[in-house]
Image (tube, rainbow, N blue to C red):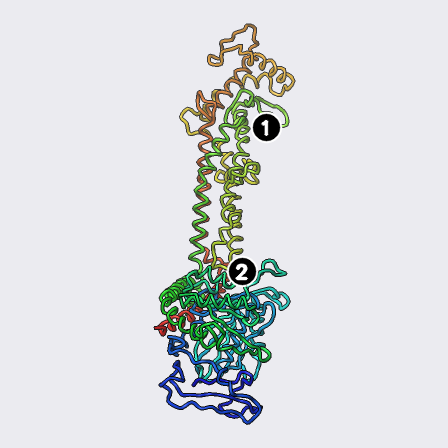
Amino acid sequence: LAVGVNPMKPRRNNGEQCCKGKLAFKAALVPFGHDPNSATATGNASVATAATGDNVSNASASFPSAPSSQRFSEMNTSEMNSLSTLIELCAQLQAYDVSVAPPKIAVVGGQSAGKSTIFNVILRQIGSEARFPTDEGTCTKVPTILTLTKGPRKIVVSATPSPEHPGFYREIAPGQPTDVQIKEAQSKILTTVYGSEGEVGTKFSPIPVQVKVSLEDMPVELVLVDLPGLVVTSDDPTQPERVRALVREQVNNDNCLMIAAGKTSNDDETDLGFALTKELDPHFSRTIRTYTRWKEAGDSMKSHRTKQIINEPDPQRKGHVLALTKVGHNIFTSDTSVAGVPEANVGTMRFMSRMGGMLGPLVRKTKGDLKKKLQAELQMCESRLAAIGGPDQPGTEANITRALIPIKKLLHQVLDEAFLKRNLILLSLKNDIITSADGSTIGHDDIAWWGVDFGEELKEFQGFKALGKCVKQKLETWKPHVECAIMGSREDQTKLGLAGLLCHEMVENKKLDLLKDCDTETRECLKRLWCKLADEQIKLVEKKMLGLGGEFSVSQTEGEKPVLTVLQEKPPANQSSAAMQRSAIMQMLKDPVDILNQEYKGKQTCLMKLKETADIYQRQNTWDPVKEDDWLVDEVPDIVQEVVLVRNRISRAAKQWVGGEHDTQMYGAVQLLYEEMLNCFKRTQENFSSWIDELGTNADLREKLAKDPHMTERNKLCKTREILNAALKETEVLH
């Protein structure tokens, strides 16, 4: 039933006289989509006029021409309903961080190009009271989806800003202003996304407002999307690009039919909407160029646009003219003809026909890609749910066990990666001792030939103790190198040490951040437990290698003595057959030491004089240290010879003690130190590995894992899966 209404008196009231008594209509019962003047009409056309006052002689001239024999859309009602539902479901998915572009018709244009007005003209044309907000400047800040379907007369405005916040839903009663409700829904989205009302002035969002209009006699079913207007300049310098990016994201899909709406007076090269659609669709396979504000343009521009439409050989690329006349607040009528412009390219009804004719093939052509995208998203959703557990959750113990799997895997990985570097640390320790100036070489001046440190007064010459002191003093120089291997070097950041291995990977490299399934509280708990164990293990290694407090301690039991003390006290230090045993050393030193002690025990003044004299002879190489009795000078006092003999024997014994008969390097002792440090590293790694395996027994960690940190994500994924399945079901209807 095609009905034409006097545009000056737009109310339609089923053929009855309207409130002012001025109504004109023409009706004929015809198959939908056919010319009412054709032979297919099943009844005679009739004209009824109201009582008096209006000249209706040309009323029929203002009636919109019936559409061509082609249907408005090649999609049937069930398909349009499915498409409408699909678009609504995809809009809901956006709130769940899933982006799927459904088939749609989107209006693209510059600010104040009349995009929202096009929607209002369409709504009025179909007889709906719904209206979009229109205003100078930017009034559309989120996509607004208009769905026209058949059904009980109803208008619904809704929005889903986020899963965590209540949505917006308003069912509009007849006569209520829908533009106000659309603005409220838009404001709800922006305040949810960006915060308080005062902070959303120049903000935009891709989350859409849904406007669903249903009429029992809906003449055409369509889904249209109104987008924010593109701008050239703004008080906010970032706004133009932000708006363009948002609009581009909405239409940059092959299943989006673009309406390039631009003022008739705009130049093609500078028209923002036309430029964007041309960039995305250079062949105009999914674009309808629409000229708005026709009556505001000059005659020369109108003539130019008319020639463009006439001369374009491809019907698909021909522009469409919407010549609108304002008849009230936010109320426009569309002229059905414009001088010189082909009838097929003028007016709202033919505009809707063109959109519908392009939408059906576009939907079917892109249906496969849409389905694949939905299936891919569903598969990712299912995989994630499998990883964190589905909605049917097992008990607390099972939750803890499942949560520990990725945690243990990561910690073992960090541990293995850390200890791959242990050899570098140990080899560096070995090399530093051997190559340092006071490292492993025992020189003449290192020989402590009497035991000044073993009593307040020098009571006697001490052979074996003097030798022990010599070795201890040398081993003392190793302590900084051992400390560096344990704690790292402050001067050289590349030398991490054991502490660096444990803490650098976990703390400084923030490896725990890889546990995306763990909340911050759980990660902090793991970090705290790891660092506590690291401190304990480092102290154990220090005690093992250096002694309590890092000092030598000879008062400890044999099993507790540090490695450096053991190396000092228990020959052979290098496990060499050439190294002397304690008994052999004492026997070698016994006779000369006894002679000295018999003559000079307690006589410190004489001893000092004797030492000075012996130093002179020994350093002048006045004797053969191998034969021990072959002096190269005469008249060396016998007692001085004894002193030199003691010193020489202590030096020989020390070298054999720590190195070998002809070796002044303490290679054997260094190797034993290396091996003991290696054992410490291995024990530390084993202790950490055992700790990781037993993490499930830690009460603090169990409490945090039992909280099920995935509850929010799981609920979100379950809802996402539900929407995706529903969307896939709707795609099956799109034949």
Most distant residue in the top direction = 634
Quadrant where the image shows the N terminus = bottom left
Secondary structure under tag 1 reads helix
Most distant residue in the left direction = 735
* Camera-nearest residue between 412 and 594: 412
**Which mark is drawn over residue 454?**
1
In the picture of the structure, the residue carrying the numbered disc 2 is: 270
Q: Position of residue 627 (x, y in %)?
A: 46, 12
Q: Position of residue 410 (x, y in %)?
A: 44, 52
| Image vertical order of residue 402 relative to residue 641, above or below | below
* Camera-nearest residue between 592 and 729: 729
Secondary structure under tag 2 reads loop
Q: Disc 2 to disc 1, how far (Cα)?
A: 99 Å
The mark closer to the camera, 2 or 1, is 2
Q: Residue at x 51, y 69 (%)?
A: 291
Most distant residue in the right direction = 605
Label 2: few (<14), some (14–19) or many (≥20) C-alpha neighbours in 10 Å: few
Instruction: For residue 92, say whether it is visible.
Output: no
Q: Which numbered disc flags the more N-terminal residue, 2 or 1?
A: 2
Q: Amino acid at mark 1?
A: Phe
Whether pointer 2 and pointer 1 mark residues with C-beta atoms closer than 8 Å, the reply is no
Quadrant where the image shows the C terminus = bottom left
Instruction: For residue 523, say whether it is visible.
Output: yes
Q: Position of residue 690 (x, y in %)?
A: 43, 51
**Which mark is drawn over residue 426?**
none
Q: Position of residue 468 (x, y in %)?
A: 52, 27
